[in-house]
Amino acid sequence: MKQTEQFILALDQGTTSSRAILFGRDGGIFAVAQQEFAQHFPQPGWVEHDASEIWQTQLAVARAVLRENGVGASQIAAVGITNQRETTVLWDRVSGEPVHRAIVWQDRRTAGLCDALARAGHVELFRQRTGLVLDAYFSGTKLKWLLDHVPGARGRAERGDLAFGTIDSWLAWQLSGGRAHVTDGSNASRTLLFDIRRHCWDEQLLALLDIPPALLPRVVDSSGLITTLDSDVLGGPIPLTGIAGDQQAATYGQACLDQGMAKNTYGTGCFLLMNTGQQAMDSSHRMLTTIGWQRQGQTTYLLEGSIFMGGATVQWLRDGLGLISSSDEIEALAASVADSGGVYLVPAHTGLGAPYWDPYARGALLGMSRGSNRAHIARAALEAIAFQSAEVLSAMEKDAGAHLCELRVDGGAARNDLMLQFQADLLGVPVVRPQITETTALGAAYLAGLAVGFWHDEAELTSMWRAERRFEPTIAADQRAALLTGWRRAVDRCRHWLEPD
């Protein structure tokens, strides 16, 4: 490596780990560092992270990827952030200390508050302004919970002593030494507080949730000069020029830059997004309308279907049931049987996302017989990821009024050939895996790199995208329909399992 060689550093802050990835001019990965952090489950349905631990792990991997590869700060042309979305942090502006653990996007503690807002007739207002369904998934009700339950928090917030942000805001604050309290449109549009057409925090929604405007970050473009890193962080004043929520970043990294293109990320959850161009398309099928990215004065919108348990289903088999000792074992175990033997696993452990939006659903294992074994359960778990994605895509196609030609896929579980083949069979269209599956970090790198001229334009990004494998459908339409009918019967038995508070 030449000492003059330049890179883009992507900070990929996920739900279970923090990563730092160096990308070269060809869009290829030069080096990666990764570190997991603790998950906290204080009550059933509650999920928390230590925001300070998130920062420390993200800082550690950023320093490690440079140190271990002999890369200096002067060789980093720009930094881009991509982050787990909706996870909510509230911190003191002076000390920089969080006032409570971060409330994670999976957390369901505010389901009752969402029900109360729905009963009061506010569902349509939230949908029209934010493009979102009124659900505990999003940040706004989590922030209200913190203000209502952390002693003294509301008074401190009203005095301007506290700052709210999703993980991108928290990292930008730390990276800049407390100078930048910012977010981008892709993250702001996930808060239940942001008008996605007027591109501003909505005073009426803030009033409904009793949230002081002084808490909120400044909204900046997803690609552009946002701030510079404090020199103590990585050894130099590196420009921070890209921010995007993880799923929007993955859509950008998959080069789904034209209207009608779609991708599915198989991460902790699954997130299927379709580019709808400069139009914020209303959904009639409980999809989300969200900002994809903003750059050079233009806003690109997406339709999204969110699934809460994707790769987390495999983690549960490993950590909760002890069915496998590592996630990599599941494909071989599942492939040891010809099919699931009629077993369906519905991973509604934290409720159901799109298209059901049922926070009171809970997980179930159905259809078992005396002949069912751990391999059938493993296969049912992989199939459940594909079933959920198929339902979301079907709803999305109805909204868009068009059928997808192919689905681009990425994320950790996209390395699983068995699952992707089943996905293609369920969808009836090719599923395409790119050569670089770290598309979330790649999208953040692209947004950061464009802002400093590291790459010239989006046409150059599109030219760098390469397919690694295409999975073609292999089953007949009647078999596909029978599988989906069985899945929907299983889902029906899990819905509304808990009684609302």
Image (spheres, grey):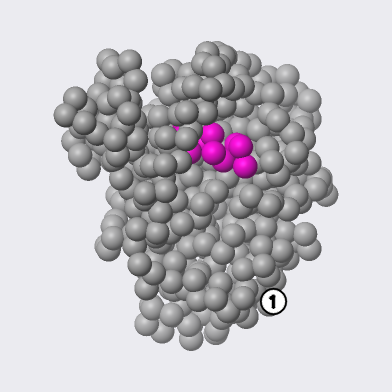
Q: Position of residue 251 (x, y in %)?
A: 63, 36
* Callout 1 secondary element: helix
Classify 10 Å Cα crowding around label 1: few (below 14), some (14-19), many (20 and above). some
User: Is residue 187 in the magenta section?
Assistant: no
* 371 shown above or below 201: above
Q: Position of residue 352 (x, y in %)?
A: 44, 51
Counting labels gives 1
Q: Position of residue 315 (x, y in %)?
A: 31, 38
Q: Which residue is located at x 41 percent, y 84 percent?
A: 152
Closer to us: 494 or 62:
494
Please give the residue where the numbered disc 1 appears in the rendered image.
203
Q: Is residue 53 left or right of residue 181?
A: left
Closer to us: 363 or 350:
363
Q: Position of residue 386 (x, y in %)?
A: 47, 31
Closer to us: 436 or 175:
436
Q: Is residue 404 visible?
A: yes
Q: Quadrant of residue 204?
A: bottom right
User: Is residue 388 in the magenta section?
Assistant: yes
Q: Looking at numbered disc 1 in the image, what kind of residue is underneath it?
A: Glu
Q: Is residue 403 left or right of residue 379?
A: right
Question: For the C terminus, which image quadrant?
Answer: bottom left
* 121 shown above or below 464: below
Q: Is residue 235 visible?
A: no
Closer to us: 385 or 244:
385
Q: Is residue 1 left or right of residue 6?
A: left
Q: Which residue is located at x 65 percent, y 23 percent?
A: 406
Q: Which residue is located at x 52 percent, y 62 percent?
A: 135
Q: Quadrant of residue 333?
A: top left
Label the magenta part by its dominant secondary structure. Answer: helix
Q: Which residue is located at x 42 percent, y 42 percent?
A: 489
What segment carries the magenta color? 386-395
